[in-house]
Image: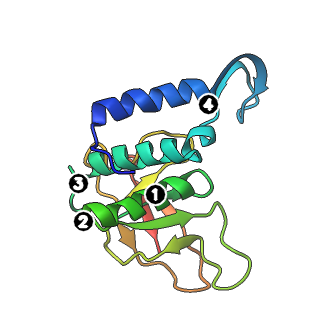
Amino acid sequence: MTTSFDPAAAKTRLLELIRERAYKDGIDIVLASGKHSDFYINGKQVSLHPEGLWLIAKLLLEKLKAYPEITAVGGLTLGADPLASAVAALSYESGQHLSAFLVRKEAKGHGTGSRIEGDLAVGQKVHHRRHGDDRWLGQEGDRCRARSGRGAGGRDGDRRSRRSGCRTVSC
């Protein structure tokens, strides 16, 4: 299916999908914080839906055009997996050529022991989706950079810059 892309229409349709597929109210749900809520938005119902994922990826690519220095997108696995992968795939078609990366909560207990998966280079500027936050870093012009870590089998991690809230990714 080939369609022209209109960001305003895409946002409208994405909100429709969120209302139709992800938003639930009149329920009693326990949040990660332990608090109760009478509504819930299950974003995976949209980010794992073909049209929803396409819309999200196209909107993110559109936003990333303002940051040509960004060369990779990613975030904490499981939530960022489909988003980063879709953005990377569509970026090939648009000529933006962005890589994807994923960050585990903890380093693997086998193989290289990596906490970060993907082809990141030292000094590479990345967009990193923070856990529990719908914003992608770099949105306000912060400078996220990949930095060298302790190498294969070492402890990978990230540090948050106090000034920008940006995460510095260690490879």
CA distance for labels 3 and 2: 14 Å
Q: Earlier in the sequence, mark 3 or mark 2?
A: 3
Amino acid type assigned to the residue bearing label 2 in the image: Gly
Q: Earlier in the sequence, mark 1 or mark 3?
A: 3
Pointer 1 residue = 86
Q: Specify whether residue 70 is in view.
A: no
Amino acid type assigned to the residue bearing label 3 in the image: Tyr
Q: Nearer the viewer, residue 98 or 37?
A: 98
Residue at 54% from the left image edge and 29% from the top image edge: 18
Amino acid type assigned to the residue bearing label 1 in the image: Ala
Q: Secondary structure at mark 3?
A: loop
* Residue 90: percent from left, percent from top: 37, 59
Residue 154 found in image quarter: bottom right
Q: Is residue 62 left or right of residue 82?
A: left
Q: Which disc number belongs to residue 133? A: none
CA distance for labels 1 and 4: 19 Å
Please identify the residue farthest to the top as the structure is shown. 26
* Residue 133: percent from left, percent from top: 50, 40
Q: Earlier in the sequence, mark 4 or mark 2?
A: 4
CA distance for labels 4 and 2: 31 Å
Q: Secondary structure at mark 1?
A: helix
Q: Nearer the viewer, residue 134 or 45?
A: 45
Q: Specify whether residue 48 is in view.
A: yes
Pointer 4 residue = 21
Pointer 3 residue = 67
Q: Secondary structure at mark 2?
A: loop
